[in-house]
């Protein structure tokens, strides 16, 4: 999306009148869900440290007046979320924290099948801390998982570091004549449709599965970690992760197509099965350890180190 000649909705100046930051904020609705876009149109970096809840509350109330009976959806209340920045998004010391909220069922319990998209495009580094939230119209059940969250993250001039910190299921509980939403911590499945960087690329899911469509770190390192499994979201023959060096760690299974550099290494550790298919020919093995079955497919295999220790 081009931001050239875009008139800002908000502008912050320094003491001498120089423009520090400009924002264009859009709010729209697609498929019954709201969408907020924050576009940085200035040359300076912008770091979001705290959300103005009064502003969000006003936006939420305005939406409810326009669409009675529909849930709000600006950041904390749900809806698609887009960030565009010419510089960095967050820092290593202060990640941008985003709470994604997606309804999984209608009030009558009918499932919602579409996914909530989140898109981030930056010219510099990207540091994100994500919390996935699913809201239900029916009671919480053991085994409920957070899902239906789709991510597209891109940096054209820096690294990408995304950490999924927490998963929450919000479900109704009725006591007497009062019904309220109660939070339940839950594992989940987090879909990264695409992620690309001009530096190292890290995705860490601390409480569930990581499913990937196309992850591309170019000549750099891609490090994917999940407390659950790391899996191909589509199940096709194409590469899911392209990088010079691959570091994969999963408490469950790993099942991916990969495209690693002839000068890089592939290292993987899983509590269960590991299935890796090299789409470009050669796998240069660092350390690979599976708690159950191990299946590697490539035209040839090389030891990426000079050590003679057992690799598989």
Image (spheres, rainbow, N blue to C red):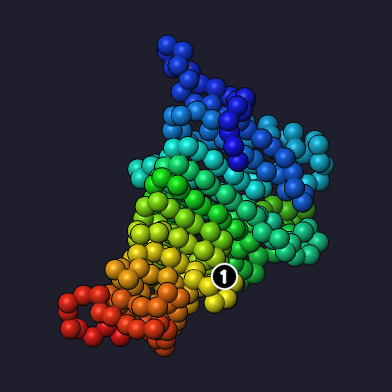
Asked whether the viewer can see residue 184, the reply is no
Q: Specify whether 156 is left or right of 109.
A: left
Q: Position of residue 122 (x, y in %)?
A: 48, 43
Q: Is residue 310 above or below residue 89?
A: below
Q: Quadrant of residue 47?
A: top left
Q: Tag count in the figure?
A: 1
Q: Residue at x 65, y 48 (%)?
A: 80
Residue closest to the eye, 38 or 250: 38
Residue topped by disc 1 = 233
Q: Quadrant of residue 282?
A: bottom left
Q: Quadrant of residue 141?
A: bottom right
Q: Residue at x 48, y 20 (%)?
A: 19
Q: Residue at x 54, y 40 (%)?
A: 84
Outermost bottom residue: 293
Q: Is residue 51 above or below residue 256?
A: above
Mark 1, Cα crowd under 10 Å, few <14 / some 14-19 / many 20+, is: some
Q: Position of residue 180 (x, y in %)?
A: 69, 52
Outermost top residue: 16
Rendered-image quadrant of the N terminus: top right
Asked whether the viewer can see residue 22, the reply is yes
Residue closest to the eye, 43 or 280: 280
Q: Residue at x 32, y 82 (%)?
A: 301
Q: Specify whether 189 is left or right of 222.
A: right
Residue closest to the eye, 17 or 162: 17
Q: Position of residue 21 (x, y in %)?
A: 49, 26
SS class, disc 1: loop
Q: Is residue 190 above or below residue 300?
A: above
Q: Position of residue 191 (x, y in %)?
A: 56, 63
Q: Specify whether 213 is left or right of 199.
A: right
Rendered-image quadrant of the C terminus: bottom left
């Amino acid at each position: 999306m081009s931001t050239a000649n875009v008139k800002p909705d908000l502008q912050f100046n320094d003491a001498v009148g120089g423009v520090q930051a400009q924002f264009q904020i859009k709010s729209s609705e697609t498929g019954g869900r709201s969408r907020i876009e924050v576009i940085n149109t200035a040359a300076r970096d912008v770091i979001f440290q705290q959300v103005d809840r009064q502003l969000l509350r006003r936006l939420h109330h305005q939406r409810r007046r326009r669409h009675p009976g529909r849930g709000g959806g600006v950041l904390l209340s749900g809806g698609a979320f887009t960030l565009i920045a010419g510089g960095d998004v967050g820092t290593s010391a202060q990640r941008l924290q985003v709470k994604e909220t997606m309804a999984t069922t209608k009030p009558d319990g009918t499932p919602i099948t579409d996914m909530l998209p989140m898109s981030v495009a930056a010219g510099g580094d990207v540091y994100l801390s994500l919390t996935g939230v699913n809201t239900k119209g029916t009671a919480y059940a053991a085994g409920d998982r957070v899902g239906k969250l789709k991510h597209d993250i891109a940096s054209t001039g820096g690294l990408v570091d995304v950490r999924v910190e927490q998963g929450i299921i919000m479900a109704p509980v009725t006591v007497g004549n009062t019904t309220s939403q109660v939070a339940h911590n839950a594992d989940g499945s987090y879909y990264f449709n695409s992620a690309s960087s001009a530096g190292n690329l890290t995705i860490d899911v601390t409480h569930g599965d990581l499913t990937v469509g196309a992850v591309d770190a170019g000549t750099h390192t891609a490090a994917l970690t999940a407390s659950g499994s790391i899996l191909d979201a589509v199940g096709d023959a194409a590469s899911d992760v392209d990088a010079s060096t691959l570091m994969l760690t999963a408490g469950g299974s790993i099942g991916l197509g990969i495209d690693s550099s002839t000068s890089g290494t592939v290292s993987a550790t899983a509590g269960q099965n590991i299935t890796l298919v090299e789409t470009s020919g050669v796998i240069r093995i660092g350390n690979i350890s599976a708690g159950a079955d191990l299946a590697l497919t490539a035209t040839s295999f090389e030891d990426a180190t000079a050590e003679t220790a057992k690799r598989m």
